[in-house]
Amino acid sequence: MKKFLIKVNGNQYEVEVEEIKAEAQAQPAAVKAAAPAPAAPAAKAAPASVSDKVPEGASSIKAPMPGTILKVNVNAGDSVKKGQVLLVLEAMKMENEITAPADGKVASVNVAKGTAVNVGDVMVSLA
């Protein structure tokens, strides 16, 4: 039996491996791990994609930087005032409030919580 230290995803394991002789190839080698393997993380749902559709006559509010939407504070049809926070965009571990540039009515919301956006993606449109 030979002992080996194996590092997997930052976790170190001590493993004993038995050398197989030519005549004993039919039998599998015994392998014992000193520590149990870590459980696989739960699969996350894929974030929603960004729609660039803007209703006719509406102005669009585009992403100023790449990031992830943390919070959506408005829905289509809501009335908003200038300076009101519409979304919270996380970029470079900072929370950025995306505000309404003018009074208006929300024509469409093109993102959802967890959506990844790139520079210039349409997030909200105002009529």
Image: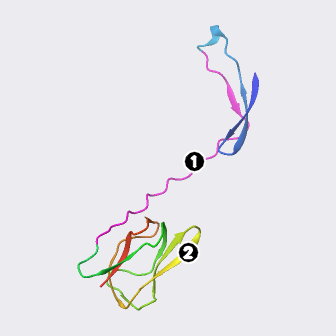
Q: Which SS does the magenta portion mostly show?
A: loop
Q: Residue furthest top?
A: 23
Image position, residue 92 (x, y; %): 57, 67
Residue drawn at point x = 67 percent, y = 24 percent? 30
As helix, strand or loop, the secondary structure at mark 1 comes to loop
Residue drawn at point x = 45 percent, y = 88 percent? 84
Image position, residue 75 (x, y; %): 37, 80
Q: Residue furthest left?
A: 56
Mark 2–mark 1 CB contact (< 8 Å)? no
Pick the front one: 28 or 122:
122
As helix, strand or loop, the secondary structure at mark 2 comes to strand
Q: Which residues are magenta?
A: 27-53
Q: Which residue is mark 1?
A: 40
Q: Amino acid at mark 1?
A: Ala
Q: Is residue 24 left or right of residue 74?
A: right
By what rule are the colours in the image chosen? rainbow
Magenta span has 38? Answer: yes
Q: Is residue 104 left or right of residue 42?
A: left
**How dense is the environment of label 2, judged by Cα within 10 Å: few (below 14), some, or many (20 and up)?**
some
Q: Amino acid at mark 2?
A: Glu
Magenta span has 13? Answer: no
Rendering quarter of residue 94: bottom right
Disc sitting over residue 22 in the figure: none
Pick the front one: 111 or 53:
53
Quadrant occupied by the C terminus: bottom left
Mark closer to the chain start, 2 or 1 = 1
For the residues carrying marks 2 and 1, which lies nearer the camera in this image?
2
The correct choice, above or below, for 101 with respect to 113 in the image is: below
The correct choice, above or below, for 103 with respect to 70 in the image is: below
Q: Which residue is mark 2?
A: 95
Residue drawn at point x = 68 percent, y = 28 percent? 31
